[in-house]
Amino acid sequence: MRKPLVAGNWKMNKTVDKATLLVADMLPGLEAVKTVDRVICPPFTSLMVASGMLAGTEVGLGAQNMHWEESGAFTGDISPQMVKEFCEFVIIGHSERRAYFNETDETVNKKVKAAFEAGLTPIVCVGESLEQYEAGKTEAIVTAQVKADFEGIDKHDAERLIVAYEPIWAIGTGKTATAEQANDIIKNAVRKNLTTQFGEQTAQMIRILYGGSVKAHNAKELFDMSDIDGGLIGGASLKPEDFVKIVEAAA
Ligand code: PGA
């Protein structure tokens, strides 16, 4: 049985003072839902203060990106070891990074390997664009991403892997894939390829989230599907009441 996981991706929102208030607002509600793994991913600048607030709770902390190198001349970037000082999780390959910051399957693959090496749990995003979706290429695109992103990953590391299937056309748009559509891609493109790469037993252990306009009103329907193990939540994770409801929907 895979334990559901719900992660909040705050993106480039909240200064430290506002992040502090937001964590304080949602923490009691999040702490109460023990049957779900709960993770928040604030911007880098708030990780230190958030890690202090989450110490002694079961709520996990994640970063939204990192470099794959340990250190060096990479102005403006942050290393796996720096993330590890405060976090257990790191989001890798979010579609916004792929679209605006030249993230490719090759760099995603390097980052996934570096995350495991640093003892971090990567939450790796895959998903197709609107154009690819309309052209009926979803399965082919997601299959190619899964193959390339996880190439050469150790089977034992893969047991800890978390994948988020996020159709790009559903992110921040208010449009969601239907629960059946999302489950179908997760099952027949994501988990099927994970099975080819890592074997049935490992693939069954990997948690696969759905992301893209998950809200309090549609979360339960999505999370009730056989292969959806939780969600990666953007906009709604900035609203404490909504985020707690979404976490409760995964219980
Ligand atoms: P959204 O974002 O929930 O605002 O659509 C999801 C994500 O970008 O991970």
Image (tube, helix red, strand yellow):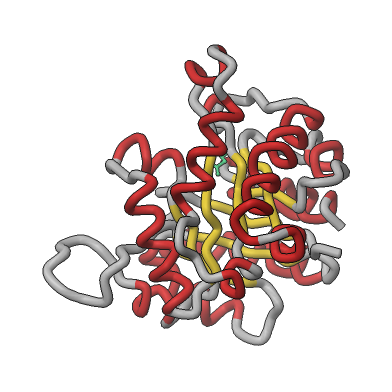
Classify 172 as above or below 45.
above
Residue 4, compared with residue 159, is above or below; it is above
Residue 6, position as x, y percentages in the image: 70, 56
**Direction bottom: furthest residue:** 56
**Dividing the image into four equal quarters, which quarter contains ligand 1?**
top right
Outermost residue on the left side: it is: 73
> Quadrant location of the C terminus?
bottom right
Residue 201: give x, y in percent of width and height. 76, 64
Res. 47 image quadrant: bottom left
Residue 14: x and y, percent? 44, 54
At horizontal 59% and vertical 66% (from top left) the residue drawn is 158
User: Quick check: 140 left or right of 100?
Assistant: right
Q: Is residue 79 left or right of residue 141?
A: left
Residues 190 and 174: in front is 190
Q: Is residue 67 visible?
A: yes
Locate residue 234: give its quadrant. Answer: top right
Q: Quadrant of the N terminus?
A: bottom right
> In x, y percent, where is residue 135?
54, 13
Would residue 61 be seen by someone viewing this image from the given angle? Answer: no
The residue at the point 76 percent across, 71 percent down is 31
65 over 105 or under it: above or below: below
| Residue nearest the viewer, comparing 200 with 67 | 200
Count of numbered tags: 0
Which of these two is toward me, 205 or 23?
205
Seen at 85% across and 67% down, the residue is: 35
